Image (cartoon, helix red, strand yellow):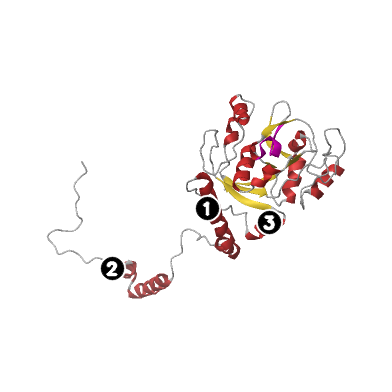
Amino acid sequence: MPPPFHSLENPFEPPKKRLKDDAELIGKFLGRAAEEEMRKIMAKEKRRPEEPEWEPFRLSNKEKARIEAPELSKLREEEAATLKAFFGESITVQPLPHEITPERIKNWEAMGFELHYLPPMDMTEDADFPGWEKKPRRWFYEEIADGRIAKDATMLPGAWVLVDGRQKPDYAKGAQMYDHDPLAPVLEDLNRRGVISQSNFDETKLDPRSRFGLSPADFTKPEVMNAFAKALDLKPGQASLTETIVWNVLANIHHPEWGTTDTTEWQKETSGSGGRLISGRSGYGGASGVGWGGRPFGRVGFRPLGRFSS
């Protein structure tokens, strides 16, 4: 128990007058002149605004313009509406990462690329979404169950992605090309430097600017993907091939035409034997079609994808 409080004042005398402030205390010991001088100093301090203990956060004019840009708000609204129609429920569309600006969007659109948001959904075989008309064929899920494809291969990334929106062409004996392809000069340079070499199944050389005829192993070379990233105004590591489930969902939601031509595209997933998944051939299920490929073929192209973290 704490000791009782004892006042220093005499209880039998009237209470002493309390000092009003520091100035009066100084005046008591140093005199009237010192008290007046102290009051002048205190008056100045009172007029001075208190400085905050933290540095207030201020947006730059560029950042303000970015946040207020109607293009970004409109894009989020459009994605939310499209995803709701596909999944049959409201989907929270995350804000666009700071690195995505209206200027970059215009540049990507000029190259034929689009921004889309894919929520972190598990696209299992038994998932029942109203807009999912073309699921990957059962073989894809069987390969996952047997351990030949990673178990998380059914998961959407929960992120904004940069998508090549152009149609893949029909097969023309390896001479077909993606229309107005911004990667053509990049592929030509990689070919010239001996990093890649496009060829058909019979080893006939293809156009060095073509997306067709690359081997599954070509996409494992860092200089290849880094060159694609640079061409698309992305950071190293942001560009890759499209995952099978991402390709499938994008085809269902935004590009059903991808499954209407008789060429296929390499996907990101690989097998231990050096093979790589392929998708999209019209005669083999279209957007539902999935299979393995293991060597260069003039019928197999590819579609790069950019990824953005929140």
Position of residue 180 in the picture relative to residue 24 (left or right)? right
Q: CA distance from mark 2 to mark 1?
A: 67 Å
Judging from the image, what secondary structure is the residue with disc 3 in?
helix
Disc 3 crowd, CA 10 A, few/some/many (<14, 14-19, 20+): some
Do we see residue 281 in this rendering? no
Q: Position of residue 205 (x, y in %)?
A: 87, 38
Disc 2 marks a residue whose amino acid type is Lys
Dot in front, 2 or 1: 1
Q: Position of residue 157 (x, y in %)?
A: 58, 41
Ranked by sequence position, the earlier of labels 2 and 1 is 2
Q: Are marks 2 and 1 in contact (CB under 8 Å)?
A: no
Q: Position of residue 158 (x, y in %)?
A: 56, 44
Location of residue 192 with respect to 140 vertically, above or below: below
Q: Which mark is residue 81?
A: 1
Location of residue 156 with respect to 75 vertically, above or below: above
Ranked by sequence position, the earlier of labels 3 and 1 is 1
Determine if the magenta segment contains residue 280: yes
Label 2 sits on residue: 20
Q: Position of residue 172 (x, y in %)?
A: 81, 42
Disc 1 crowd, CA 10 A, few/some/many (<14, 14-19, 20+): some
Q: Write down the quadrant of residue 146 in the picture.
A: top right
Question: Is residue 134 or residue 66 the one in the foreground?
Answer: 134
Label 3 sits on residue: 109
